[in-house]
Amino acid sequence: MFLFLWFLSVGTITLAQSCPDYADYSDQYHAPFSAGRYNLSYQRPAVGCRTFISQAVEDTIMRLNSTIADPDLFQLFQNSYPNTLDTAIKWKGYAAGTDEELTFVITGDINAMWLRDSANQMQSYLPLLNASSSNNSIASLYRGVINLHSRYLLTSPYCNSFQPPVESGIAPATNGAASDDVVVPAYNDNFVFECKYELDSLAAFLEVSSNYYNATQDVSFFQKYQWTDAVNAVLTVAEAMMTSTYADDGSVNQSPYTFTRQTNRASETLENSGLGNPVQSGTGLIRSAFRPSDDATIYQFLIPSNMMFSRYLSSAALIMQAIGNQTTLTTRMTALSSQLSSAISTYGIVNDPNHGTVYAYEVDGYGSRNMMDDANIPSLLSAPFFGYLDTDDDVYQATREKLLSADNPYFMRGPVINAIGGAHDGPGYAWPMASIIRIFTSSDDTEIFNTLKEIVSSTDGLGLIHESINSFNQADWTRQWFSWANGLFGQMILDLESRKPEILGMSFQ
């Protein structure tokens, strides 16, 4: 048995003024340390400094204390799984004058709410989600996130990251990088933190909605407030972003979205005065100006994002159907989902000289393709994780083989960790998030064990999941307070408990 701190109170916490900034706290080492060779730090805040307490999560940690044999692995699980609840529920309350729940979830060390990150942060607790009307429940957190997503999408549907709701009383954060951005359509920086149009942000709203509905069957929630209007806004943007660069007569179409930024990083702005690189007409695919890493796409038809959007359009259409009297919206959703799936097969599957028939990461409809993968979800590697296809799909298996090899320009190799990275942190920096997805998408015990051992041994003793790690030097890393990746690690451990429990009984020393 390993250290476990027990408490009985549940729900939201009013933080004491003496609580340290977790950005500073998590960058330091704290006793009690794990009893394994890696001597991992304990990283949970004091009970009174945690931002939300769920008894279900605490019970889960206690249960895994008896299941995980390795002391370092348990310490990492104990630190990481509750990280969003411990540190990132910045505010929880109600829309002014109503009973509409709102949950403002920060990414960790950035004081803003990303649609994608917050949806995935909630997904970490999907195994524990059940129907509950209590405002101290995981279900309430989900409802608050969905409602706040709806508000954001109805105001600035092309944007990816948002400021605290006015009801919270929290001042808007300053984004110095975005101060000179020129974006069409324009936005209000008191409401929006950053406005990079990313198709996966729209998909994330449908994802968190589908996850809540499937776990609770709470259709009455979706009949209230603004969910239906928000879905309509999502569809309007998606349909608009199917606009090609050129009209049939060769003239340049007006793009619904453009973005330029004064920067010395090519991945932080778009080519062609904010239009992005040209895309062909008639493909049936949806453009994405930026990737889930917040880096600019090279070719705007980003296949993993189209996969994710197709998958969650289909599942969210079941909610719309259950609401009733929404035939038009339901039909739009199912038709677009089917169209995207067909378009992905037509334009997203290509021939690779070394691996045969595989998925491309980005295409433009003209025949150009970007053969790589990025660690952030949605990725090609994660396609089975978000339910677009099965792991035994032949094209996926060939793609996976390529992505986890030197034939992927962003597969980082070294003595510390071997995993996919990306342009966001650049060559040499592997992302543990990609290692976690590798485990989720594998049934091979040796692959799972070796990948998990690399994760456990590469935290630089801090006992948290970093954003990225130098594959040759574990002391060189980025972002220790990255709640999405930490929660995803815990979610993966629960998945192993279900399908590969013997691995949790192994030593990683």
Image (cartoon, grey):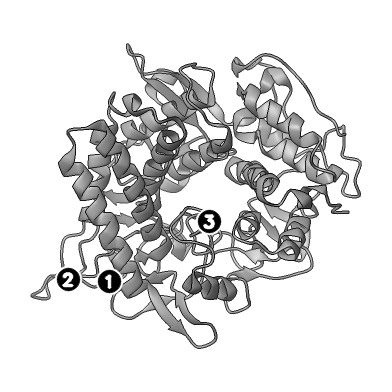
Q: Quadrant of residue 95?
A: top left
Q: Quadrant of residue 98?
A: top left
The circle drawn on residue 329 is none
Q: SS for tag 2?
A: loop
Mark 3 vs mark 1: which is more N-terminal?
1
Report whether residue 22 is seen: yes
Question: Residue flagged by tag 2: what amino acid is it?
Answer: Tyr
Q: Which residue is mark 3?
A: 376
The answer to whether 222 appears left or right of 360 in the picture is left
> Residue 350, percent across and down?
41, 79
Q: Residues within 10 Å of mark 1 (few under 14, many from 20)?
A: some
Q: Residue at x 66, y 16 (%)?
A: 17
In this view, 354 is above or below 39 = below
Question: Residue flagged by tag 1: what amino acid is it?
Answer: Pro
Mark 2 vs mark 3: which is more N-terminal?
2
Q: SS for tag 1?
A: loop
The answer to whether 185 appears left or right of 142 in the picture is left
Mark 1 vs mark 2: which is more N-terminal?
2
The answer to whether 307 appears left or right of 108 in the picture is left
Mark pair 1, 2: CA separation: 8 Å
Which quarter of the figure is the C terminus placed in? bottom right
In this view, 48 is above or below 73 = above
Q: Looking at the image, is mark 2 or mark 3 nearer the viewer?
A: 3
Q: Which residue is mark 1?
A: 278
Q: Residue at x 63, y 75 (%)?
A: 405
Q: Which residue is mark 2?
A: 246
Q: SS for tag 3?
A: loop
> Residue 170, percent across and down?
47, 23
| Residue placed furthest toward the bottom | 353
In this view, 149 is above or below 433 = above
> Residue 449, percent across and down?
76, 59
